[in-house]
Image (tube, rainbow, N blue to C red):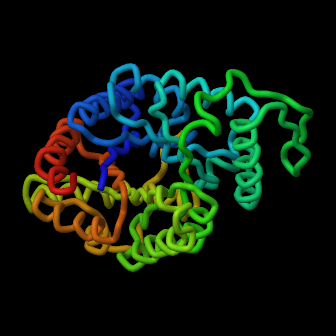
């Protein structure tokens, strides 16, 4: 089982400065590369202070310039927000500048606040995503592509420069619904998923959907991978775990607001709203614990056959504590799974 550090910006205080937020994330990426993590992952979100990264391909190139081996994975790029005719070229250039270390995770978008303010109604995102994905794959695989669809109509064109490899970077699909995971894997996509604050049964259902697709595909599905994103933090003690879980609960008050809630945002800052789930129930669903407990939890994932765990560590802890957690994970946890 491999591990990725999710470079997800959390910006609850504007006085901290966006420049410092991204310096912190770059420092995390450099450390993860040095310690032997498989990948770092970058979100795409606009207009809000959680998962704040409006330019993931630019940041991927920056990371590549400061690291040597680590893969750089988008988790995820929101295809309906882009014009595939220009985005395909930007993607090829980023793949070249990252020297082939880019892994493209794609999705439809999850936050109505940002999607609708950028002119993409939530009820259209699935159809827009489906067509955008088809257009992107065609542009990366073929020359002189023309299109006559619902959202794209254009005469023959060829994106330049051409991809390093036919079809462009390895592509991963972000999907949470177990049945959706099954259908996306059947189409030959690697999968990124997460149960978020959901229970263990949801995770099992997600894994089963993926494995069912691989089993039915037989030889054609043997190389497909399943990556799981979780809020994860290696704590120093039981007291430290309690403190970090309290920070995570405050984080989810904002996350829920834009993910499933009303989307109340004031000048870019998401308002924390009351949660139905108790702090204790949330803590049971997250991976915030000491190294020995972390190994126990992750062994369950390894036994399920999960290929990569994406560690979401940016939910309000200090940069010092985050770097210590990354280091402890690499030295005390990762060796049990490599």
Q: Residue at x 58, y 74 (%)?
A: 179
Q: Residue 305, can we see it?
A: yes
**Percent position (x, y) of residue 114?**
62, 47
Q: Residue 83, can we see it?
A: no
138 relative position to 20: left or right: right
Q: Nearer the viewer, residue 39 or 216?
A: 216
| Residue found at the far bottom of this picture | 201
| Residue found at the far front of this picture | 219
178 relative position to 316: left or right: right
Image quadrant in which the N terminus is located = bottom left
**Percent position (x, y) of residue 264?**
55, 54
Q: Nearer the viewer, residue 38 or 177?
A: 38
296 relative position to 83: left or right: left
Q: How many marks?
A: 0
Q: Residue at x 40, y 59 (%)?
A: 228
**Percent position (x, y) of residue 183?**
62, 68
**Res. 125 image quadrant:** bottom right
Q: Residue at x 16, y 59 (%)?
A: 241
The correct choice, above or below, for 61 with respect to 332 in the image is above
The correct choice, above or below, for 185 with respect to 94 in the image is below
**Res. 199 image quadrant:** bottom left
**Percent position (x, y) of residue 262?**
58, 61
The correct choice, above or below, for 235 with respect to 169 in the image is below
Q: Residue at x 45, y 45 (%)?
A: 50
């Amino acid at each position: 089982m491999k591990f990725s550090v999710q470079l997800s910006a959390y910006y609850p205080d504007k006085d901290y400065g966006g420049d410092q937020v991204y310096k912190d994330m770059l420092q995390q990426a450099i450390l993860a590369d040095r310690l032997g993590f498989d990948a770092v992952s970058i979100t795409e979100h606009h207009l809000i202070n959680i998962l704040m990264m409006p330019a993931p391909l630019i940041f991927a190139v920056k990371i590549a310039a400061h690291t040597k081996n680590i893969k750089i994975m988008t988790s995820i790029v929101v295809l309906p927000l882009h014009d595939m005719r220009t985005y395909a070229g930007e993607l090829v250039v980023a793949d070249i500048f990252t020297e082939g270390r880019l892994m493209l995770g794609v999705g439809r978008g999850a936050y109505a606040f940002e999607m609708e303010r950028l002119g993409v109604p939530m009820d259209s995102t699935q159809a827009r995503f489906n067509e955008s994905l088809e257009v992107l794959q065609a542009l990366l695989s073929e020359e002189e592509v023309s299109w006559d669809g619902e959202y794209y109509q254009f005469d023959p064109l060829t994106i330049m420069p051409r991809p390093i490899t036919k079809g462009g970077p390895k592509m991963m699909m972000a999907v949470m619904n177990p049945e959706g995971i099954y259908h996306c894997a059947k189409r030959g996509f690697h999968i990124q998923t997460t149960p978020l604050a959901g229970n263990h049964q949801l995770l099992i259902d997600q894994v089963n959907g993926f494995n069912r697709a691989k089993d039915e595909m037989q030889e054609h599905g043997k190389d497909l991978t399943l990556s799981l994103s979780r809020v994860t933090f290696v704590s120093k003690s039981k007291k430290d775990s309690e403190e970090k879980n309290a920070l995570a609960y405050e984080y989810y008050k904002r996350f829920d607001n834009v993910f499933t809630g009303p989307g109340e945002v004031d000048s870019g800052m998401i308002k924390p709203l009351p949660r139905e789930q108790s702090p204790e129930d949330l803590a049971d669903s997250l991976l915030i614990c000491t190294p020995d407990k972390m190994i126990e939890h992750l062994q369950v994932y390894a036994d399920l056959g999960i290929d990569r765990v994406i560690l979401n560590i940016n939910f309000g802890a200090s940069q010092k504590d985050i770097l210590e957690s990354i280091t402890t994970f690499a030295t005390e946890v990762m060796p049990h799974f490599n």
